[in-house]
């Protein structure tokens, strides 16, 4: 989900100053100039942010709940990266929230079977986003089949996390495939 309630400006500043900027400077020092997406997979601990991994791509499913909130055209941002003038682009973000839920195959992250038809995608509300991951086109017209462990991410944007969560969880039961399972506790609001 995005934005995470714990990721406040002081933490964002610490991540930039202690992890992301040093990584970019180290690449530059080694004459390994990099232009593109640098995804820092982080774990936020009581001792501060820790690096789990770096990837030269968008994080998945992380980008699927952040990019829907991007108001600036992503193409303009990427062209500015290529042309070396990103500092001239005003990157703007929506104040909305986005919640995404991964629909997975039975057995994931271990062994799982593939090739099952996915139904219900055409019954979703118009503002629901579906990101295909472990899918493929079937032999029948408009047929989509499972082809991986993480099959789909279904996401919704709302004015609040609660609104986005409600929208996504109202739509998830409309999608069906054999062995489908997903977490039901993403940003669950605990009653005290």
Image (tube, rainbow, N blue to C red):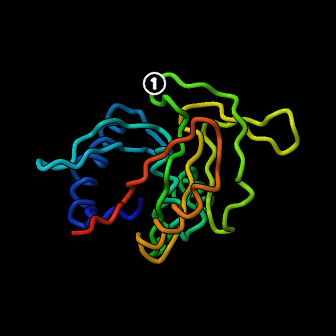
Q: Which residue is at a point 23% across and 49% down the rendered structure image?
A: 44
Foreground pick, 25 / 1: 1
Please state the horizontal and vertical placement of residue 75, each as a whole percent of the image: 63, 58
**How many numbered marks, from 0 up?**
1
- The picture quadrant where one finds residue 190 is bottom left
Residue at the outermost right position: 141
Quadrant of the snapshot with the C terminus: bottom left
* Label 1 packing within 10 angstroms: few (<14), some (14-19), many (20+): few
Q: Which residue is at a point 45% across and 69% down the rendered structure image?
A: 97
Dot 1 corresponds to which residue?
Answer: 110
Q: Which residue is at a point 42% across and 75% down the rendered structure image?
A: 160
- SS at circle 1: loop
Please state the horizontal and vertical placement of residue 31, each as a whole percent of the image: 39, 33
- The picture quadrant where one finds residue 28 is top left
Foreground pick, 145 / 130: 145
Q: Is residue 186 above or below residue 111?
A: below
Foreground pick, 191 / 71: 191
Residue at the outermost top position: 111
Please state the horizontal and vertical placement of residue 156, each as a whole percent of the image: 54, 64
Quadrant of the snapshot with the N terminus: bottom left
Foreground pick, 191 / 21: 191
Q: Is residue 6 above or below residue 55?
A: below
Please state the horizontal and vertical placement of residue 42, each as a whole percent of the image: 30, 44
Q: Is residue 146 above or below residue 46?
A: above
Q: Which residue is at a point 35% across and 61% down the rendered structure image?
A: 188
In the picture, measured across the screen, residue 63 lies left or right of residue 26, that is: right
């Amino acid at each position: 989900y995005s934005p995470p309630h714990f990721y406040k400006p002081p933490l964002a500043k610490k991540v930039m100053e202690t992890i992301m900027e040093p990584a970019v400077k180290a690449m530059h020092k080694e004459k390994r100039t990099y232009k593109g997406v640098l995804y820092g997979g982080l774990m936020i601990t009581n001792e501060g942010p820790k690096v789990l991994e770096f990837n030269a791509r968008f994080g998945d499913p992380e980008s699927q709940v952040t990019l829907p909130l991007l108001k600036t055209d992503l193409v303009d941002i990427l062209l500015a990266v290529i042309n070396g003038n990103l500092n001239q682009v005003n990157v703007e973000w929506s104040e909305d929230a986005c919640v995404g839920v991964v629909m997975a195959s039975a057995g994931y992250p271990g062994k799982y079977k593939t090739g099952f038809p996915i139904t219900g995608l055409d019954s979703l509300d118009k503002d629901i986003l579906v990101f295909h991951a472990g899918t493929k086109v079937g032999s029948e017209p408009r047929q989509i089949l499972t082809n991986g462990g993480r099959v789909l991410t279904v996401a919704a944007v709302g004015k609040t996390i609660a609104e986005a969560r409600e929208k996504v969880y109202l739509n998830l039961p409309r999608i069906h495939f054999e062995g489908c399972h997903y977490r039901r506790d993403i940003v669950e609001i605990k009653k005290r």
